[in-house]
Image (cartoon, rainbow, N blue to C red):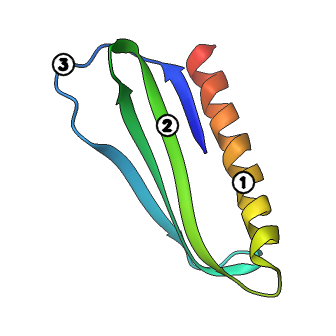
Amino acid sequence: MMLICGGGHQEDRPERHYSYAILQAPFPADGYVSTIRVHAVPGRDDLAEVQWSGRFNPVGATEQQVVDLFTGIYADGLDALHQALTA
């Protein structure tokens, strides 16, 4: 999932990312690891691209069911981020 949103100017653009694991949750998956990355948009100092990805092993559900679950969670999270940054 990706989101493009406005931001401030930054001269030096280091890699910006955050990774996390969910060890216990009521999700039909284990081994869940996710990363959120923020990339500069070439030629646009007022925008950034946010990419949120994850990997997991489905447990008690099909892979597609778990993909759909996390896709919805990611979309809601990116929508909330966009709302916070454009308010």
Q: Are marks 2 and 1 in contact (CB under 8 Å)?
A: no
Task: Name the spot of residue 54 as percent of width and height, x first.
Answer: 55, 63
What type is the residue that disc 3 sits on? Glu
Task: Name the spot of residue 18 as percent of width and height, x first.
Answer: 40, 52
Q: Is residue 59 above or below residue 20?
A: below
Q: Residue at x 33, y 21 (%)?
A: 42
Outermost residue, left side: 12
On-image quarter of the C terminus:
top right
The mark nearer the N terminus, 2 or 3, is: 3
Look at mark 2 in the image and give the residue it sits on.
50
Look at mark 1 in the image and give the residue it sits on.
71
Q: Is residue 28 above or below residue 80?
A: below
Look at mark 3 in the image and give the residue it sits on.
11
Outermost residue, bottom side: 60
What type is the residue that disc 2 sits on? Val
On-image quarter of the N terminus:
top right
Is 84 in front, or is 62? 62
Q: Alpha-carbon neighbours of circle 1 within 10 Å: few (<14), some, or many (≥20)?
A: some
Q: Is residue 8 above or below residue 41?
A: above
The answer to whether residue 24 is left or right of residue 6 is right
The mark nearer the N terminus, 2 or 1, is: 2
The answer to whether residue 66 is left or right of residue 43 is right
What type is the residue that disc 1 sits on? Thr
Secondary structure, mark 2, is strand
Q: Residue at x 56, y 70 (%)?
A: 55
Q: Label 2, label 1: how many angstroms apart (C-alpha)?
A: 14 Å
Is 44 in front, or is 32? 44
